[in-house]
Amino acid sequence: MLKLEFPQELSKVHNTFHVSNLKKCYADEPSAVLLDGLHLDDKLHFVEEPLEIVGREVKRLKRSRIPLVKVRWNSKRGPEFTWEREDQFKKKYPHLFTKTTPSSSAAL
């Protein structure tokens, strides 16, 4: 059995577990995650949230046009970007559309 000391922010995590739960880590550099930028839910799962809209594009189909936004997310692996449908994204995250965002017709 292994017992760890956690900071107060991780007080809900059980601090004792069997060593069979450990996995080898083959990293070239030490990986330390700062707790300041992490958003965890009640079950201590990492919550990815959109941070900002960084671009715009219109996808042209035969008879329709679909406005898209390029979104920067807070990811546990670092910054991630995805293209999302503007209408659906605006319903879920309207606060991101109150700021002025860059407009672009080309993919970034």
Image (cartoon, rainbow, N blue to C red):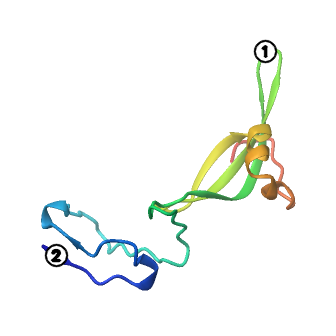
Badge 1 local density, few (<14 within 10 Å), some, or many (20+)?
A: few
- Please give the residue where the numbered disc 2 appears in the rendered image: 2
Q: How many marks?
A: 2
Q: Position of residue 49 (x, y in %)?
A: 62, 58
Residue 43 placement, left or right of 101: left
Q: Amino acid at mark 2?
A: Leu
Image vertical order of residue 32 relative to residue 59, above or below: below
> Residue at coordinates 19% horizontally, 64% vertically from top-left?
22
**Which image quadrant for residue 86?**
top right
Residue 16 placement, left or right of 59: left
Numbered circle sitting on residue 62: 1
Badge 2 local density, few (<14 within 10 Å), some, or many (20+)?
A: few
Q: Position of residue 79 (x, y in %)?
A: 56, 60
SS for tag 1?
loop
SS for tag 2?
strand
Which mark is in front, 1 or 2?
Answer: 2
**Which image quadrant for residue 33?**
bottom left
The tag earlier along the polypeptide, 1 or 2, is: 2
Separation of marks 1 and 2 at Cα, in angstroms? 60 Å
> Residue at coordinates 70% horizontally, 48% vertically from top-left?
70
Whether residues under marks 1 and 2 lie with C-beta atoms below 8 angstroms apart, the answer is: no
**Which image quadrant for residue 66?**
top right
Q: Position of residue 50 (x, y in %)?
A: 66, 56
Which quarter shows the N terminus?
bottom left
Residue 29 placement, left or right of 59: left
Q: Amino acid at mark 1?
A: Lys
